[in-house]
Amino acid sequence: MAIATEQDILDGLAEIIDEIVGIDKSEVTPEKNFIEDLDIDSLSMVEIAVAAQDQFGVEIPDDELRNLKTVKDVVNFVQNLQQQG
Amino acid sequence: MSTSPTTVVVTGLGATTPLGGDVPSTWSALLAGKSGVRNLDWEGVEELPVRFAAQLAVDPAESIPRAQLRRLDRSQAIALIAAREAWQDAGFAPPVKRAKSGKAAEAAPGEGFVVDGDRLGVVVSSGIGGLHTALNSYDVYKEKGWTRVSPFTVPMLMPNGASGHVGIEFGATAGSHALVSACASSGEAVGYAIDMIRAGRADVVICGGTESCIHPLQMASFGSMRAMSTRNDEPQRASRPYDKNRDGFVLGEGAAVMILESEEHARARGATVHAVAAGCGYSNDAYDIVLPDPSGSGQAKAMLRALDDAGLRPEDIVHVNAHATSTPAGDVAELASIRAALGPVAEKLTVTATKSMTGHLLGGAGALESVITILSLREGLVPAVANLEDMDDEVDLDIVRGEPRTIPAGPAAALNNSFGFGGHNVSVAFRRAV
């Protein structure tokens, strides 16, 4: 899989969030906190993480998922793993 | 009249059914004698013994956004749709959404009466629960493994899920309940709601039932019981209670919800009262897990207990909305039970069978038929039984056929019967609001 740019990951994540919890893509910006700002609950985060794993070809272990509080956290996490190859 | 100091009234009605996406469209279709039964178009349907059912007239996706539907079983989605209609019909303010983060809710509700959540209960039943979810999730598991199974599978398949979702939407913190008693489930939900208000646990209760289980497994398993009509060449004529050529029930899906309220609460806010939810009677056959007791004594007891609970006399009952599922034995046995319970005055009342047009909504049936009973009293009009071409010789009560029948103005009461696998018998009594 080609390494995605930060913008590609952000766009892909926004699409997943729109599909799973129905939040408009324009709302999904890097600084947004999933719980505080986007009102996404923990079960939905599990669904989003599984979809993100499929889309970006990376593993997001449950232990790591707990630390991913904002959109930017996920984008950075995916990008780091992709770069490690 | 009633021995209870608290009179319970019905102030809101909602439904989504095989005949329409709301109460007015369902009611007008019933009066017009329309059928909600359709051919199933599934792949492999030709392998099934029954290839038709009464599916919803309106897809829930028309009113619930896709993302919300992902986490609702179809039976839960339609319960929410019916509850929203009932809520609006009652004149209550739209609910205020609470954020998961625990942030304070946005104030400024819209037009309407604001209900105190601690005085608001919910009782929404389902007989089967989230069957589609259970089976579809198992397919996902087998094909893709456990990590791809939706984390919402458990709340989507549990039969109390609909009650939970309705409670969340409207902030009903007095209590949320889901009585599971097969095809008597939502008759019991109405009875439980009456009791919650009488006991002082709530002023307002959202109550009803839902079912959506038109799935090949249900067609196969009811088919293997030989319980369903196999009139595959004429599906719209398959549900024909009291007709000589009836051969079983037709599976239906849908949801119906009522707003019950103490009369005091309803009058204080100037609500429109559709009817009085006068009382409810229950019994258990304790005979067989699926067969009704052939003596009919359990069914008669439920009706007598409903009269007693409602403070009504047999001669007050002008109409019975029968359970009548179109099975050869069940329909006429129920008529004998009505006669046993009410005595000679049974000959003066009218009987109808809603399932002739809606099919059998299982856990949704008691609530939908309660809504229809309430409308019959309010409008003074009883829908006719559809497909009743050649009356069974054993029928000896006044079945409404051909055209809807009027109920004259003035005091009137009616019973709505629901009986379920397991031996459950429930009869709900409604009185015309005067």
Image (tube, coloured by chain):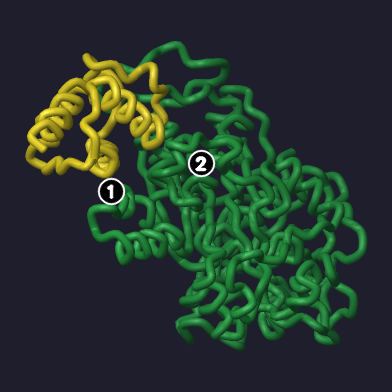
Q: State whether residue B27 is above or below residue B105.
A: below
Question: In the rendered structure, which amino acid carries the disc numbered 1?
Answer: Pro
Q: Is residue B270 left or right of residue B133?
A: right
* Chain identifier, green in the render: B
Residue ID at (57%, 16%) = B111
Which residue is labeled 1 in the image?
B151
Mark closer to the chain start, 2 or 1: 2
Which amino acid type is marked by label 2?
A: Leu
Can the viewer see residue B163?
Answer: yes
Q: Residue at x 50, y 45 (%)?
A: B77
Residue A20 or residue B10, whichever sits in front: A20
**Where does the image place residue B324, in percent across and percent down from the top left?**
69, 71
Q: Residue at x 45, y 51 (%)?
A: B73
Judge by depth and name the residue closer to the eye, B86 or A11. A11
Residues behind callouts 2 and 1 on a single chain:
yes
Disc assigned to residue A24: none
Residue B80 is marked as 2
Tell me if A6 is positioned left or right of B296 in this view.
left
Display colour for chain A:
yellow
Q: Provide the chain ID for the residue under circle 1.
A: B
Residue B365 appears left or right of B351: left
